[in-house]
Amino acid sequence: MFDLIIRNANLPDGRQGFDIGLAGGKIAAIEKSIAATAGEEIDATGRLVSPPFCDPHFHMDATLSLGLPRMNVSGTLLEGIALWGELRPLLTKEALVERALRYCDLAVTQGLLYIRSHVDTSDPRLVTAEALLEVKEKVAPYIDLQLVAFPQDGYYRAPDGVSSLERALDMGIGIVGGIPHFERTMEDGARSVEALCRLAADRGLPVDMHCDETDDPLSRHIETLAAQTVRFGLKGRVAGSHLTSMHSMDNYYVSKLIPLMAEAEINVIPNPLINIMLQGRHDSYPKRRGMTRVRELMAAGLNVSFGHDCVMDPWYSMGSGDMLEVGHMAIHVAQMAGIDDKRKIFDALTVNSAKTMGLEGYGLETGCKADLVVLQAADVTEALRLKPNRLFVIKAGKVIAKTAPRVGELSLAGRPASIDMARDYVPPVLQR
Ligand SMILES: [Zn+2]
């Protein structure tokens, strides 16, 4: 009756010791004890079983290009953009496809099965778009890859910005991007937001813009984006990525802005690793954190999901495709360390991202897709603390990746022979 049963699983909502039965690529049962047997069974031994991680903001055309053609010496956003401009003419479709596929391999072992990637459309050759459309098809059996047409050098600022973006949409890229804060003037930025929202409405596509990725408190394109979202009937289908200027904005202005964003049902995508690394670079001390107002946006009912943004590319030399590393940083930068806070952060890596990406059949409910991850951790707060191994990654009811549990062996007289950090150090407050 079942293809696979996972026994003794802890669920993200805190329920413990449940069996999950998978059949026909769907979750067929979640019960305290499933009496039936299955061809394959996994004993989760009281570990957390979660829906897969989703990354709603990534750059798969740049990933794993670290050091090509040189390193980012200053480590700044602007040198990163300049460096990408040097690498871009050298890109070939073959190399782009190869790097993206290697990243997807890594993502699968990390239980990351849903990714939204921006695709730079500034070079009219559009090899980036060609390559990632091919990758999207190749990885479809295991990763759901969404692509955004992203005018990195500016929709109006780059010579072919407007025509290249439209051609990328014609090729089959399904989301409209933008970068209003990088246009030449505030006015051009606002005009680009209007034009891109109009384009999305005309074509029936969602919007996901890099918006106000700056420390300038007067970078207020998110206000225009919210207004144009309402005007063009795009409510709930627009994402504002980064929104770092909100960190530095005047509090009174923000008290008006957040309700406008809520009215437009803007999906907010902070990128904690990149924001803490790249923002505040012009400050001496005190130095701003440069992440948007996560707690306040969540409290106002906005859907907040976190992106990884970069892994080993011109902007960020670190990263490993681990969304729990992203969540771990978010806890620190947003100062959200309470147990309820951590649950909200975990949601921002899973269910909230699924909402941002408009995923159907995602979740841990009967009838949802049989896409799951078994983690070497007792619950979501422990997962965020430990960034543990993904013991089993399951797609459409089949195990597609396994990693052995991490266990340390000790040679100390009178002390234990081994420790499993995820089992032996669960704090009493979580032992219900
Ligand atoms: Zn980005």
Image (tube, rainbow, N blue to C red):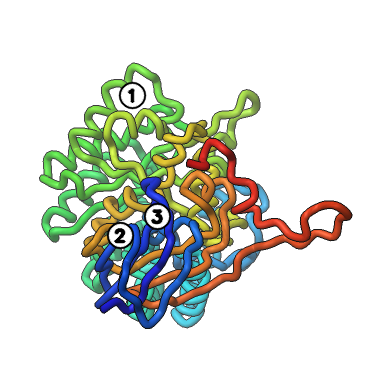
Residue type for callout 2: Glu
- Among numbered discs 3 and 1, the one appearing first in the sequence: 3
Front-lying residue, 293 or 348: 348
Location of residue 214 with respect to 323 vertically, above or below: above
- Among numbered discs 1 and 2, the one appearing first in the sequence: 2
Q: Please state if 204 lies on the left or on the right of 193 as rendered.
A: left
* Circles 3 and 1 in contact, beta carbons < 8 Å: no
Say whether mark 3 is within 8 Å of ligand 1: yes
Label 2 – label 3 distance at C-alpha: 34 Å
Provide the secondary structure element on which disc 3 rests: strand
1 vs 2, front mark: 2
- Among numbered discs 2 and 3, the one appearing first in the sequence: 2
Residue that appears at 52% across and 70% down? 106
Mark number, residue 31: 2
- Density class for disc 3 (Cα within 10 Å; few <14, some 14-19, many ≥20) is many
Q: How far from the left and from the top, in percent, is residue 239?
A: 29, 47
Provide the secondary structure element on which disc 1 rests: helix
Q: How far from the left and from the top, in percent, is residue 102?
A: 52, 75
Residue type for callout 1: Val
Mark number, residue 254: 1
- Density class for disc 1 (Cα within 10 Å; few <14, some 14-19, many ≥20) is some
Location of residue 10 with respect to 104 vertically, above or below: above
Say whether mark 2 is within 8 Å of ligand 1: no
Image quarter where the N terminus lies is bottom left
Q: Please state if 182 lies on the left or on the right of 356 as rendered.
A: right
Q: Where is mark 3, residue-wise? A: 57
- Density class for disc 2 (Cα within 10 Å; few <14, some 14-19, many ≥20) is some
Residue that appears at 38% across and 48% down? 15
Front-lying residue, 174 or 89: 174
